[in-house]
Image (tube, coloured by chain):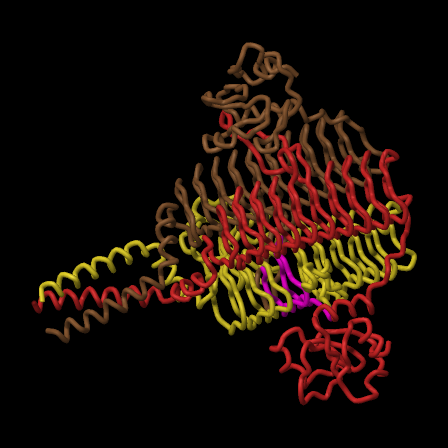
Chain colours: A yellow, B red, C brown
Amino acid sequence: MKLKELASLTDGEIIGPPQSDDIEITGVSGINEAKKGDITFVSSKKFIKDLPGCKASCVIVKEPVSDLDIIQLKVSNPYFAFAKLLEYFYIKPHKCIGISKDAFVSDKSKIATDVSIFPFSYISEGASVGTGTVIYPHVFIGENTIVGERCIIYPNVTLREGIKVGNRVIIHSGSVIGSDGFGYVFEKGRHYKIPQVGGVIVEDDVEIGSNVSIDRATTGNTIIGSGTKIDNLVQIGHNVKIGKNSIIIAQVAIGGSTEIGNYVTLAGQVGVADHAKIASETMIGAQSGIMGNVSKGVYSGSPAMPHREWLKASALFAKLPELYKKIRELEEKIKKLKGGN
Amino acid sequence: MKLKELASLTDGEIIGPPQSDDIEITGVSGINEAKKGDITFVSSKKFIKDLPGCKASCVIVKEPVSDLDIIQLKVSNPYFAFAKLLEYFYIKPHKCIGISKDAFVSDKSKIATDVSIFPFSYISEGASVGTGTVIYPHVFIGENTIVGERCIIYPNVTLREGIKVGNRVIIHSGSVIGSDGFGYVFEKGRHYKIPQVGGVIVEDDVEIGSNVSIDRATTGNTIIGSGTKIDNLVQIGHNVKIGKNSIIIAQVAIGGSTEIGNYVTLAGQVGVADHAKIASETMIGAQSGIMGNVSKGVYSGSPAMPHREWLKASALFAKLPELYKKIRELEEKIKKLKGGN
Amino acid sequence: MKLKELASLTDGEIIGPPQSDDIEITGVSGINEAKKGDITFVSSKKFIKDLPGCKASCVIVKEPVSDLDIIQLKVSNPYFAFAKLLEYFYIKPHKCIGISKDAFVSDKSKIATDVSIFPFSYISEGASVGTGTVIYPHVFIGENTIVGERCIIYPNVTLREGIKVGNRVIIHSGSVIGSDGFGYVFEKGRHYKIPQVGGVIVEDDVEIGSNVSIDRATTGNTIIGSGTKIDNLVQIGHNVKIGKNSIIIAQVAIGGSTEIGNYVTLAGQVGVADHAKIASETMIGAQSGIMGNVSKGVYSGSPAMPHREWLKASALFAKLPELYKKIRELEEKIKKLKGGN
C-alpha cells in the first residue's frame, strides 16, 4: 500500500521528501512496537518524545513535528486515522457460514439472509436474527428475542427471552443480557422473589464487553442507549436507563432504576446506587460511589464530591497524622499561654 | 380478571365506589409505566406524590391515601401483593421438554421425572437431577454433582464435580459453582498449587445471579445457606460459609474461610477479607471493606466503622482543606499572642 | 497409607511414640474438620491453640509443639507438605477421553496425542492443542489459537482467535481470553471503534480463575508472565503486561497498557489505572487505587500511599469529628485569651 493512498483514505497531508508519496506501508502499530514499513501515530504531545527512537516509516500527527527524520502524515484526528488504518489493514470481512447443521434453530424463529449461526448455538421459538449477523458457538437466544442486523454475538453469550438488540451491536463472550433483576420482598422471615417480567432494550451501535451482566426490568425495560460502550465485568441492574454514547468502564456497578444521561463517562469500578440520576456529560472518577441526583460535572470519591475538592481533600488525607499532632501542640501551647497569664 | 378476585388473592380490601369490585384488571406495572387497566402499588410513603399523574386503574396501598381518584386495594404488605400479582399475571408454568436428544447425558447419571434438559447440556457420570428441574442449553454438570428438585439452571452455567444443590434453587447464566479455590504455597520461588478437593453446598431456595463465581473448598465445603440470595458478579472464596436468608448484592467479594451469619446484607461492591466473621443481622454499606470479627450492627467505610460514625467522618472529609487552613490560622494567632506576651 | 511413607514423601521427621511410624493415615483435612485417621497441619503459630481439640491422627508442624497428644510430622514447609499430601490422596490422573464425536474440531486444526476434547467444544481452523491437554464441554477455541501441553480448559471458556497459551496452564470456567480491548476514538459526536488486532500471550504455569476477562491488545500482545496466578472475576485491559509469579486476587481491574512486575501481589478489588507501572515485589492492599509509577513497596488506600502511612491516616479518619471539635474549642480558647489580654 502506497503512502499516498493512505493519505487519501485519511484526508491527510504528507510531510517529507518528494519520494514520500510512493513509499510502501505494510502495517500499522503502536509507537514502541513499530518496525520499518509500519505507520504509527502520536495521539498527544506527550508521546512526541518517544519518536526519535521509533522505527516506523511514517508517523501520523496533528501538527508537524520539527527535526524529525520520519515522514509525517498530518491529519485532523490522528487517533481516528490510526483506527481507520487498522481497519483497512487487518479487518477481513466476515465470511458468512450460513446456519450450521450442528446448531439448534427453532423452526418457529426467523433468520434473515447472510446470517452465520455456528455449531452449538441455540435459537429459541419466536426469536429473530437480522441480516448479516454472526452468532458464534454456544450462544443462547431466548424466546421472542430480537437481534438486529450486522451484529456480532461472540461465543458463550446468553440473551434471555424477550430482549431487543438493535443493529450493529457487538456483544462479547460470557455476557448475559436479561438475567432476572435482583428483587425480593421480605415476608414472614424470608425473601420472596418478585417476578422480573420486563425486558432489556439494547439500541443500535452499542458494544458490550465480556462477562457483563445486564438484568431485565421488573416491569418495563432496562435500556442501553445507542452508541453507548460498556467494558468488561460491568453490572447493570433492573430498570436502569443509560442514554446515548456513554462510556461505562470495567467493573462498574449500576443499581436498579438508576438513570444515566448521554455522553456520561463512568470510570473503572465506580458504584452507582439504585434510583440515582446522573446528568448528561458527567464524568465520574474511578472507584467513586454515587447516590442521589448528580448534576453535570466531574466527580470523584466515595461518597463522591466535585473532583477538584476531592483532589485537595485526598491530598490532605495522608497528612491526618500531622494535623493531629499540630492540634495537640496547639493545645499544649494554649495551656501554657493560659498558665503564663 | 376482576378486582375482587385479586383482592381475594392478596387478602386485600377494596377502597372505592361500589362498582370497583367488578372492574377488569389486565396487567401489573410500576407506578410510572402503568396504563389504564393496570394495577400498580406504592411501597413507601415517598412514592404517594407520584400517584396523581398515574394512569393505573387500581393502586395497592398499605394505608388508604385520601383525595385520590384511583381505586385502592389495601393490604398489609403492598410489595408482597405486587409480587404475587406479577406471578399470577405473567409467570407461565414451565412446559417440560424432557431430555433433548441433542444433550449429552451420561448413562451413569440419575435423571428424575419431569426434568427438562435442553440441547447442548452436558450431564456427567454419577450426577443426579431432581424432579421438575430445568437445565437450559450449554449447562455443564460435573461428576457426582447433585441438583435438587424444581431448580432452574439457566444457559451457560457450570456446576463442577461434587457440588450439592438443594431444591428450588435458581442459578443464572454464566455462573460457576465449584471452580478451584485460590490457594498456593510459596516454595522455591514459585507458587505451588494447593489441590482444592472439597465441595460446595448450595442449600434450598438459594438464588444465584449471573456471572457469579463460587469456589469449592480446599477440604470440607463452601456453604451457601438456605434462602440466601446472591446478585450478579459476586465472588465467594473457598471454605466461605454464608448463613440463611442473607442478601449479597452485586460485585461483592468474600475472601476464603470467612463466615457470614443469617439475615446479613452486604451492599454492592463490598469486600470482605479472608478469615473474617460477620454476625447475623448485620448490614454493610456499599463499597465497604471488612476485616476480622464484626458484631451485629450497621457499618460503612473502608476500613469499615459503625455507619453513623462513618457518616459524620465522611462529611468532614471534604472539609479537610478548611480544617487545614484553620489550624494554620490558629498557629499564626498563637504566635502573635506569644509575641504579645 | 502408613505414616512413615508420608514422612518419606514430604522429607519429614516423625515425632511420637515408637509405633507412630506404622499408623495408617486415611485422609487429609483442615484442622477443624479433621477426624481420626486424618493428617492435618499448622501453617502458622497462631493456629497451635486449635490443636488440643483436634481429632487428627497426625499434625504437620514446622517446629515441634510441646505437650501435645497428637503425633507430629516435622517438615520445613508444613503448608507445602499439606499440598503434596492432598495431591497424593485425592488427585486422580485425568483419564484421556480422546476427541468426542460430539465436539466440533476443524480438520484444519492440529490436535496432539493424549488430548481430551469433550462434547460441544469448538476448535477453529488453524488452532492447535498440545499433548495431554483437556478441553471440557462448551469451550471455544478461535482461529490460529495455540494451546500448549498438559493444560486444563474448564467448561464454558472462550479463547478467541490468535491467542497463545503455554504449557500446564489452567483456565477456569466462564473466563474469556482475547475479547476486544476497550478502545474508541471520539469523532463527530460518536465513539468510533479502534480495531483490536493484537493478541494475548499466556505463558507457562499460569492459572486463571473463573469469569476472568483478559482483553487482546490493540496491536502487539497482552502478556501474562509465567507462573502468575489470577483469581476470579479479574479484568485485564488491552496491552497489559504482567510479569512472572505475580498474584492477582479476585475482582482486581487493571487498565490498558499497564505494566506489572514479577512477584507482585494485588489484593482483592484493587484498581490500577491505565498506563501505570508497578515495580516487582510490590504489594497492594485490598480495594486500593493505583495510578502512575509505583516503586517497590507496600501500599494501600485510594489513591494509594505507603501502607504504614495509610494505617495511621485511616485510623484518624474516624476521629475527624473529634478533631473538628477540638479545633473549634481551640478557636474559642484563643478568642478568650485575646479578650483576656
Whether residue A71 is visible:
no
The residue sitting at 68% across, 35% down in the picture is C146
Tell whether A312 sits left or right of A130. Answer: left
Task: Name the residue at the left extreme.
Answer: B341
Q: Nearer the viewer, residue B121 or A283?
A: B121
Residue A46 rendering spot, x and y as whole percentages: 43, 55
* The N terminus of chain B: image quadrant: bottom right
Whether residue C322 is visible:
yes
In which quarter of the view is residue A21 placed? bottom right
Tell whether B237 sits left or right of A305. Answer: right
The residue sitting at 68% across, 28% down in the picture is C150
Residue interval drawn in magenta: A219-248
The residue sitting at 71% across, 47% down in the picture is B203
Residue C17 rendering spot, x and y as whole percentages: 53, 13
Residue C272 rendering spot, x and y as whole percentages: 49, 50
In the rendered structure, does residue C250 fall within the stretch colored magenta? no
Name the chief secondary structure element in magenta.
loop
Does C19 appear above or below B162?
above
* The C terminus of chain B: image quadrant: bottom left
Does A304 appear above or below B73?
above
Does A196 appear above or below B104?
below
